[in-house]
Amino acid sequence: MTSDGGAPQTAFVWIWLPGAEEPVVAGRLDQRADQLIFGYGRSYQARSDAISIYEPELPLRPGVIEPPDGFEVANCILDAGPDSWGRRVIINKLLGPGQADAGALSELTYLLSSGSNRIGALDFQGSPTEYRPRGEETASLEDLARASDLIQAGEPVPEQLEAALAAGSSVGGARPKVLLRDDDRQMIAKFEALTDSYPIVRGEFLAMRMASLCGLRVAPVRLTSAGGGKDVLLVERFDRIRGTRRRRAMVSALTLLGIPEMAPREASYARLAQIIRERFRDPQETLRELFARITFNILSGNTDDHARNHAAFWDGDGLTLTPAYDICTYVRGGGEATQSMMIGLPEDPFRFSQIAGCIERAGLYGLSAVEAREIVDGQLTAIEEHWDAVCDEAGLPQQTRAMFRRMFPHRYALEGFTRSEVQSGGR
Ligand SMILES: Nc1ncnc2c1ncn2[C@@H]1O[C@H](COP(=O)(O)OP(=O)(O)OP(=O)(O)O)[C@@H](O)[C@H]1O
Ligand SMILES: [Mg+2]
């Protein structure tokens, strides 16, 4: 139940069609009891270039589309809205500092209060005829880093800074972050959290850089500092096209899998592999990339590989896997660990953070055991080869280097796995 008395009852969904520099109105969301129902506008349906926001969830057809049972709103709409960090920023702005209950505001309030420069190709507006972007306010990275600390500490944020922080509130995820522009490039800046007990931002830099050196397609990252010498990770956005105002539509793996937000543990990589086979462009290469991302997540200690940390571009017809993002080395003790998504199918819900179990299931990803081993061998070789250089780039002192090295890979990850004698040479 929300305490959002005067909450909006309607929002208009605007979309950047493929190749378009400006958005057009696609339809409207209406609050009906606890659900948001959607309908495409007549003018949108009449366009020859109209695409569905995402199929099968919101097929392009006349009439009202209700969310499936167990959903309050279509997942592809939620993908464009704020998650726990953005909600916190909005609560802070609308209800005051230190308020913590994300249920205090309605979904439509979150969609209509968050910044317009959101992930993917959608935006939400109060009007079907006039497009007014929210969140044009900017501030220095230095000020934004400090403002993010104030929000986390439950302290008041100066009004102008609050507005600049709110501009990035539509970006999902739980960690503190803002949006940045640098010339014609757009980036997500990820900050340290006040609760971090080790340099987690550097752990993300390390894993992201290493993923790229292991041959994965990864969003480019850069490390900088702000807010009194604190680490900041700059991640280049892949849902924007440099030098244009175009936006690329994307959906999370949660949406692809049709799983409600409240049941993320139902997500399975192997089920995603089936969807890739059925609906993706270039399925064979994509399956190989997916398998390599799974094994890299295990080798790098990234156990937070949930279904919102994978996504695909959608062009109204086909799907392509986006570059990888949010790969982070989490420091943990010894013993058993699990991945956030199942590596087997739901009837074989294997999810242990172990390479041997992945290789046994390589067939689900269109790979032979030999090919799967080659991928892992190549990753292990690349990690060894580039370790010192990447740690230097990350500016890691010896002790921190050693701490991350124990996770990279964790001993548990390689139990039951023997490396091939012939190395495949880094890729
Ligand atoms: N390089 C990128 N380009 C476009 N969108 C991105 C990029 N990186 C992340 N995103 C989007 O932003 C969201 C939040 O980013 P990210 O997952 O890095 O944040 P997080 O707070 O670390 O997430 P989590 O809650 O999983 O820890 C992602 O779910 C994805 O939708
Ligand atoms: Mg994430």
Image (cartoon, grey):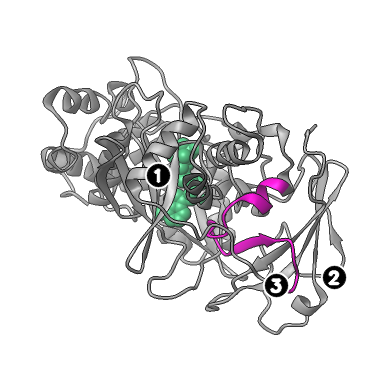
| Circle nearer the N terminus (2, 3) | 2
The crowding category of the residue bearing disc 2, from other C-alpha atoms within 10 Å (few below 14, some 14 to 19, many at least 20), is few
| Amino acid on which disc 3 is placed | Glu
Residue at disc 3, secondary structure: loop
- Looking at the image, is 170 positioned above or below residue 395? below
The response on whether ligand 1 sits within 8 Å of label 1 is no
Numbered label attached to residue 130: 3
Q: Residue at x 59, y 64 (%)?
A: 133
Residue 327 vs residue 56, the one in the foreground: 327
Q: Which residues are magenta?
A: 109-129
The earlier-in-sequence mark between 1 and 2 is 2
Is residue 114 part of the magenta span, yes or no?
A: yes
Q: Does the segment drawn in magenta span residue 183?
A: no
Q: Quadrant of the N terminus?
A: top right
Q: Which residue is mark 2?
A: 62
Which amino acid, mark 1? Answer: Leu
Q: Which residue is mark 1?
A: 144
Foreground tag (2 vs 3): 3
